[in-house]
Amino acid sequence: MSSVSIESKYVLAAGGRETQEFARLDLLQEIFDPTTKSRLDLVRPGWRCLEAGAGRGSIARFLSQKVGASGEVIGADIDLAPSAGVALANGSFVKHNILVDSLAPIGGPGSFDLVHARFLLQHIYDHEDLAIQRMVELLKPGGWLVIEDLEAATMAAADPNHPLSEGYDQIITGSVAAMRASRAVDPTPGRTLVPRFHRAGLVNIRHEGLLYIERGGSKLAQWYVQSTEGSRREYDERGYNDAIDLTIRALKDPDFWFQSGAFHCAWGQKQ
Ligand SMILES: C[S@@+](CC[C@H](N)C(=O)[O-])C[C@H]1O[C@@H](n2cnc3c(N)ncnc32)[C@H](O)[C@@H]1O
């Protein structure tokens, strides 16, 4: 497949801001890994697994332990810098764009028992179905696709009495619309997983979505602050500076309570 027709615009690319981005990805892992690991309980020794958009590599490493010496794990990503230094006993990290690169170097069609991707679809807006179709192509018959992603539209202030709540809610509504308009980050990929899995012909589809009520300064709040700061360049150009400042002030205030984005997961099996 040609590598020029589909643009992959990763707004949080580490280039030039590695320290901040690696810290953001480390915190992401600390917050979400326990849930992801329980969601991957189905993985068995001897399986061949693909971690697509592997980032810092903690889930590839976890899968590698689960499948053991008789299995294999490939961690694929367009950027290998974040996972440099992570060793897999029974696999490797491969530079690979899930949208355009040949499937052959990672094993080819029908070669994986599991393909997992977390927070990848949100960064390939308008190409989610293509990515899912290619991930399904990589599965053996009976293999599992497990995708986790977020839903920003559930983010909201939780305490109507806090002075920043009203402004925060207006900003969330505006920023979901702005993300959509930018076509750079999909703000609501989580809720689309199940229909996409059906369209891709998967069976035995299951889904769950989790929400959290947290306060400013929590680990999740810190991650939101880092993610907001990380994409500031993108939004600064659009004149959202005051909104970003208010959001960050709220997320650092321990008296500010908020509802998180939803952390969705869908499982589906190839026939
Ligand atoms: C938000 S990070 C999530 C990392 C990891 N999945 C996790 O949850 O810890 C998104 C990752 O997807 C990668 N990525 C973005 N577009 C990609 C593409 N088209 N193909 C493969 N990886 C991609 C980025 O380089 C980045 O490492």
Image (cartoon, rainbow, N blue to C red):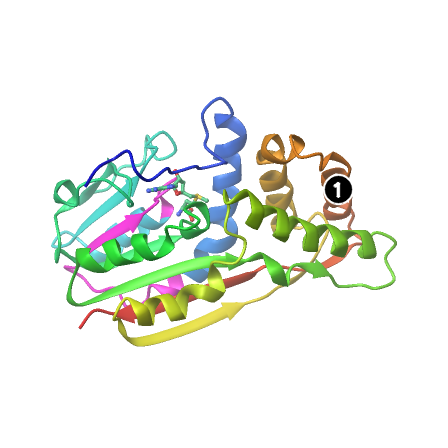
Seen at 45% across and 62% down, the residue is 35
| Quadrant of the picture in which ligand 1 is shown | top left
Rendered-image quadrant of the C terminus: bottom left
Residue 45 highlighted magenta (yes or no)? yes
Instruction: Identify the residue shown where x is 47% and y is 58%.
Output: 189
217 left or right, relative to 63: right
Q: Residue at x 65, y 59 (%)?
A: 155
**Residue sitting nearer the eye, 40 or 154:** 154
In this orientation, which residue lies closer to the viewer: 182 or 73? 182
Q: Position of residue 196 (x, y in %)?
A: 36, 66
- Asked if residue 167 is positioned above or below residue 267 in the image, the reply reads above
Residue 172 x %, y %: 69, 53
Quarter occupied by residue 67: bottom left
In the image, residue 55 lies in the stretch drawn in magenta: yes
Residue type at mark 1: give it: Ala
Residue 256: x, y in percent? Answer: 78, 54
Badge 1 residue CB within 8 Å of ligand 1: no
Instruction: Name the residue that disc number 1 marks.
Output: 243
Residue lying farthest to the top in this orientation: 16
Count of numbered badges drawn on the protein: 1
Q: Is residue 250 left or right of residue 7?
A: right
Instruction: Tell me the crowding category of disc 1: few under 14, some 14 to 19, or many 20 or more residues within 10 angstroms, Cα based.
Output: some
Instruction: Assign the N terminus to one quadrant of the image.
Output: top left
SS category of the residue bearing label 1: helix
Taking the spot 46% from the left edge, 72% from the top edge, the residue there is 208
Give percent across and percent down for residue 99. 29, 45
Region in magenta: 37-58
